[in-house]
Image: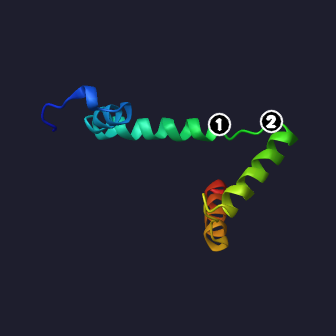
């Protein structure tokens, strides 16, 4: 655990990180799961214009190297696994 700190110099991110690290593993797991679900729900597309904008932004991000392409083999393996899980 950390010793006394000067909280006036601590950023909000540092404070949240400290709080997160102090939680039991099950709480941290639940927290990460909730963040992931929030991220996924933010990706829902409701119109053709949103889909087009997202596709164009993704292309710009790839071109600018802000994001990486996922190798075809990795995507196909994940898809095959997902389909196998649905078959069960």
Q: Is residue 7 left or right of residue 83?
A: left
Secondary-structure class at tag 1: loop
Query: What is the image's colouring?
Result: rainbow
Q: How many numbered marks does the figure carry?
A: 2
- Mark pair 1, 2: CA separation: 11 Å
* Residue carrying label 1: 42
Indicate the quadrant containing the N terminus: top left, top right, bottom left or bottom right: top left
| Residue 53, image quadrant | top right
Indicate the quadrant containing the C terminus: top left, top right, bottom left or bottom right: bottom right
- Residue neighbourhood size for the residue with mark 1, other residues' Cα within 10 Å, grouped as few (<14), some (14–19), many (≥20): few
Horizontal and vertical percent for residue 62?
Answer: 67, 61
8 and 57: which is toward the camera? 8
| Residue 15, image quadrant | top left
Considering every residue shown, the one lying at the far bottom of the view is 73
Q: Is residue 30 left or right of residue 74?
A: left
Horizontal and vertical percent for residue 82?
Answer: 63, 58
Res. 83 visible in picture? no
79 and 6: which is toward the camera? 6
- Residue neighbourhood size for the residue with mark 2, other residues' Cα within 10 Å, grouped as few (<14), some (14–19), many (≥20): few
Q: Residue at x 38, y 35 (%)?
A: 13
Q: Residue at x 37, y 30 (%)?
A: 12
| Residue 79, image quadrant | bottom right
Considering every residue shown, the one lying at the far left of the view is 3
* Residue carrying label 2: 46
1 and 6: which is toward the camera? 6
Considering every residue shown, the one lying at the far right of the view is 48
Q: Residue at x 86, y 41 (%)?
A: 49
Secondary-structure class at tag 2: loop
Horizontal and vertical percent for residue 57?
Answer: 73, 50
Considering every residue shown, the one lying at the far top of the view is 8
């Amino acid at each position: 655990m950390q010793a006394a700190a000067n909280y006036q110099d601590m950023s909000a991110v540092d404070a949240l990180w400290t709080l997160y690290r102090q939680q039991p593993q099950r709480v941290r797991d639940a927290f990460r799961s909730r963040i992931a679900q929030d991220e996924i729900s933010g990706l829902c597309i409701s119109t053709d214009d949103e889909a087009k904008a997202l596709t164009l932004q993704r292309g710009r991000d790839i071109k600018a190297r802000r994001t990486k392409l996922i190798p075809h083999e990795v995507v196909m393996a994940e898809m095959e696994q997902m389909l196998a899980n649905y078959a069960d």
